[in-house]
Amino acid sequence: MKDIEKRKADHIHVSLSEKVYSDHNYWDDLHLIHDSLPEIDLEEIDTSIVLFGKKLSAPLMVTAITGGYLEAEKINHNLAKACASLGIALGIGSQRAAIEKGDRSSYEVIRDMGIPLVVGNLGAPQLIRQAKKDAFGADAARQALDMIGGDLLAIHLNYLQEVAQPEGDTRARGCLEAIRELAREVPCIVKETGAGISRETAMRLRGIGVRGFDIAGTGGTSFSKVEAYRSRQMGDIRCESIGQTFGEWGIPAPISLRLSQVGLPIIASGGIVNGLHATKCIAAGAQCAGLARAVLKDAMVSAEAVEDRLRIIIDELRVGMFLTGSSTIKQLSERRVVYTGPTREWGLELEVI
Ligand SMILES: Cc1cc2nc3c(=O)[nH]c(=O)nc-3n(C[C@H](O)[C@H](O)[C@H](O)COP(=O)(O)O)c2cc1C
């Protein structure tokens, strides 16, 4: 197995076998006000939204997970079939392997499936020249979108992961300019990978033509912890220590959601594992909820398993809407949110709640 393939396989297997998610799920600090007289019928609730011009049956996206090795083809097929059947959005994992090594089949498998919104994925570190490696430009971005029939490209920011990775790309100078150039050529959103987006970062990205954000805040999968496990297996005690030390680093997802509100659509993610979390993030200002870990185990099994899991999440969202008297997503977005615990402390300190 080539290095890049082994890394991708390791990420899946470590995420499934080790406790690599945050110690605290910050969405649990948010609460909605119960409406004991909702005056709507559960069946009449409409969960549909329009996101980036595409109609989704529910404000839900399975965000980037994998691609670029054999098992990834099965995972992506299962995710794609479920998302198409339910009419929700899908983001593919980093397409670096396809661009660098030409290994496309595990990505192409999601093409022409009838998914309403398909999001490609390239890493910000790959947009700038790294030691001995050329940068990806507009050509690579177009290739990435073409191979999946993508509507948008997500540029992922993952420097927390890179510093804890023995083979990590740690050059970050010039990233903003590289994103600006790419955003002129292809429609781009910017996504974090578990450490959240700050107000300053959101403002800078808005100013260079980015169309939206996936905040991927702290509270869910921690790539710092994932890399700590990989580093241990590789005998790299320096990176193992960095990965552990920074395992809880980042901006809590609900706080990043508040900070990123600069007038662009937001996918809120980082620790969303059920439909109540999705309900809360919409009430707190997101246009869409994003999740990865919540479907990972099922994605190894079958498309039906993924679909069953997502159907429950959508049903729970519907229940959350019913119990807050919200018959549409717009009404849900107007509901009051009560912040408690560490999220409240962060929110008061940063004056965002
Ligand atoms: C196994 C695994 C692989 C991932 N690979 C990518 C990736 O290639 N590109 C990316 O932008 N995010 C990647 N992510 C990050 C997710 O898209 C998401 O932002 C993050 O896991 C937080 O969501 P969660 O708490 O629901 O898992 C990956 C996540 C997991 C669990």
Image: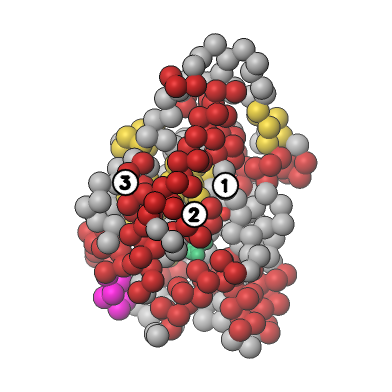
Left or right for 103, reference 125: left
User: Which label was assigned to residue 272?
Assistant: 1
| Labels 1 and 2 touching (C-beta < 8 A) | no
Report if residue 198 is visible in the image: no
Residue 20 in percent (x, y) is at 63, 65
Residue 296 in percent (x, y) is at 49, 59
**What residue is rendered at 63% in x and 69% in y?**
18
Q: Which residues are magenta?
A: 96-104
User: Which label was assigned to residue 295?
Assistant: 2
Indicate the amino acid at tag 1.
Ile
**What residue is rendered at 68% in x and 36% in y?**
30
Q: Is residue 102 magenta?
A: yes
Can you say which quadrant of the picture contains the C terminus?
top right
Indicate the amino acid at tag 3.
Ala
Return the residue at label 3.
84
**What residue is rendered at 60% in x and 50% in y?**
271
Q: How far apart are the alpha carbons under marks 3 and 1?
A: 20 Å
Report if residue 25 is visible in the image: yes
Q: Is residue 11 magenta?
A: no
Indicate the amino acid at tag 2.
Val
Q: Secondary structure at mark 2?
A: helix
Which one is in front in this view, the residue at disc 1 or the one at disc 2?
Answer: 2
- Residue at disc 1, CB closer than 8 Å to ligand 1: yes
Given residues 331 and 315, the one toward you in this image is 315
**Mark 1 nearby-residue class (10 Å; few <14, some 14–19, many ≥20):** many
Given residues 192 and 132, the one toward you in this image is 192
